[in-house]
Amino acid sequence: MALTRIGALYVALFLLIVPEHAADSAPRETSTNVASLSYDTYRIKEIVIEGLKRIPQKSILTKIPYRVGDIFNRSLTNILIKRLYELGAFRQITVKIVPAGTDELTVYVIFEEKEPLHHVVLKGNKYFSEELIKEKTKLNEVRSLEREELNKYAQRIKDLYAKKDYHLVDITPSIETIDGNRVATFTIKEGPKNLI
């Protein structure tokens, strides 16, 4: 298992190999030492996408560097994971390799999507408008947001205030579900402007 830092999150990259004797059954959570198995001569018979709820499968397939009929190349898995995490919509991505005969395999790409963000609320901001804060911190581009990512955006807001000599600004981020919609709230206490 490789651990990759993406943004403020640590993401586990799993390349799971299901032993050949289990190829006729459904994929299982079986982990094997990847170094001990060589699928470098196996052709990709099928690419199976699982777990998508809101993201169209077509947009995912364009990010996958594998194609049906290609020889499997394990090193492309890191590219696959990076491209898909750049979409910012996933908590977890798992890649499973399952033998499908003597010289073919099936690549499973399994997703756990983040919950979509309905909107962002800013409270207590007087010096900057809500629109300006969202634009400068890129909060206006966020489509999904996890609790772990809130502090990254709170820091961006603090940095924006610091550029205008508001060094004592305090920001309390929170995320909650209101009437079935996820809402991120940033409560801002601007404090006094430094005059020195």
Image: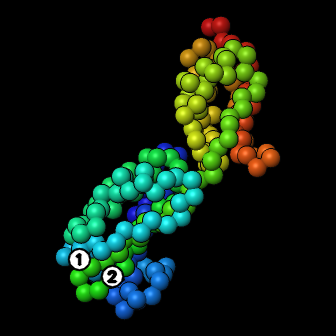
Residue 131 lies, in percent from the top left, at 63, 21
Residue 86: x, y in percent? Answer: 43, 46
| Residue drawn 25% across the image and 87% down it | 102
Residue 15 visible? The answer is: no
Label 1 amino acid? Answer: Tyr
Please name whichever residue, 10 or 131, is drawn nearer the observer in this view of the structure.
131
Q: How far is mark 2 from mark 1, CA to CA?
A: 8 Å
Q: Check disc 2 and give the amino acid type.
A: Pro
The dot on residue 42 is 1
Numbered circles on residues, count: 2
Residue nearest the observer in this picture, 67 or 76: 67
In this image, 153 relative to 19: left or right? right
Is 146 or 159 nearer to us in this picture?
Answer: 146
x 46%, y 80%: residue:
27
**Which x, y percent locates residue 49?**
45, 65
Label 2, secondary structure: give it.
Answer: strand
The disc label shown at residue 99, or none: 2
Q: Is residue 180 visible?
A: yes
Quadrant of the rendering where the N terminus is positioned = bottom left
- Above or below for 175 versus 192: below
Q: Is residue 150 left or right of residue 188?
A: left
Instruction: Left or right? Give the position of 196 relative to 177.
Output: left
Q: Earlier in the sequence, mark 2 or mark 1?
A: 1
Q: Is residue 16 above or below residue 94?
A: below
Assess whether mark 1 and mark 2 are in contact (beta carbons under 8 angstroms): yes
